[in-house]
Image (cartoon, rainbow, N blue to C red):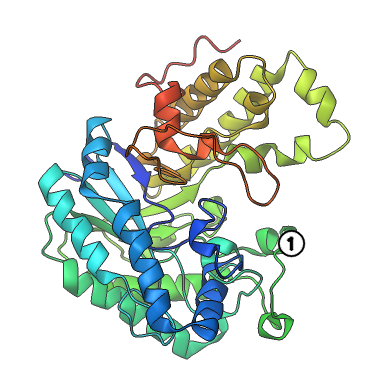
Amino acid sequence: MVLGIDERIDGVNLGNWLVLEKWMDPKPFTRSAEDDEIWMHRTHVSLWSERNLAEELRRHRETYITLEDFRIIVGHGINLVRIPIPYFIFGDWPGHPGCITYLDRAFRWARETGLKIMIDLHTVPESQNGFDNGGLTGVCKWAQNTDLVEYTLSVLERLARRYRDEPALHSIEVLNEPVSWSVFHSTSNTAKDSHEASGSTYVSLRFLKRFYRDAYARLRAVLRPETVIVFHDGFRLLRWGGWFRRAGMRNVMLDTHQYLIAMEDPLFSGPARRLYLRSRRLPWLYRMLVGASGIAIRSAARRIPVLVGEWCVENQWALHSQNRSAAYRQVSRLQRAAWDVSAGQIYWSYQLARSAKPGSGEGKPPRDPRNGGNLEAWDLTRVWRHGWIRADTSHDDVP
């Protein structure tokens, strides 16, 4: 039985464990005061040493996710964890300590608890998107360098060879969020080093298809036939059509990231923001927003299984509602109902700053270091604690 084909995926991302994101937990960035992981590494090595950096990272990784977390995750009915990993996972990139032993550990825990694992290559050298989650903010030049692309393919192949016989391996996602023209030009991610960022641009669909074809060939030659190979839609969900089928690819999925905060942004970023937030028609508006994403997923799923690989209940309605819990519950039911046709969904993320008691969601609500905003909805342990997600997907109670 293959998750996402014979049974729906109900998963969670283990973000900020092996790939650091400052907004999720600023603590590892305290000494360097940098805003992304690559610059945090560079500054740390320059001021202290790579050995010192390795020790800092070891302390974070040893405690951030443990066997106890895997047990908690299974106890909440989750059947898969998506684990973001960096391109330097094998420790062969100067100045960036590897972390392959922790992925080995995750597979051991998965065998013990019955969870399945999706390995997600979250970063590549010189970045595929210029986001902080790509490791190097404001830089997007990876696709222009054939040596870096080949290195990326070699990392994927090494991962496949290492874990091909692991019973817990569900899938390998070849690349997270390669950026489209529209997304690249609508975001303002400023690089620390403007010279390094010079020449940055989006990842074209033509290049992405070539890279996906090469990655598939490398992985399928190594992996077992039942192991799924996952491709991100590159923020172009409806542009793929029947390409994967025509390319002869077997047992593949298309990953799309559906964040309500991105869908609602055009409505709440302008002068009409106050009117929308006070409107009694907000439930109807959110039904329309979520419904539109459901229609797109349904259309794409006619050609290839579609997985919502990242999502969260965060939205402006709940943040400004007098009954925040009710709004979150309604929105989560809307989203899960709209995605019934999909292969499943994977929440971002399991936790932000770690609670003193693993998986409890206790402690002060996490705040966004960029603007002080409340980040509780991004932390699934807190979402569970507040009851913002329920097992049923009915949305009949939404006005």
- Identified at 59% across, 20% down, the residue is 324
Determine the residue positioned at 66% across, 18% down.
284
Residue type beneath disc 1: Ser
Quadrant position of the N terminus in the picture: top left
Q: Nearer the viewer, residue 23 or 328?
A: 23
**Disc count in the image?**
1
Occupied quadrant, residue 100 = bottom left
Q: Which residue shows up at 51% across the image and 24% down it?
A: 334
Which is more toward the observer, 189 or 102? 102
Q: Nearer the viewer, residue 371 or 197?
A: 371
The quadrant of the rendering that contains the C terminus is top right
Residue extending farthest to the right is 271
User: x, y percentage for residue 283?
Assistant: 64, 18
Report x, y in % for residue 89. 34, 73
Q: Is residue 117 left or right of residue 397?
A: left
Q: Which residue is the site of mark 1? A: 188
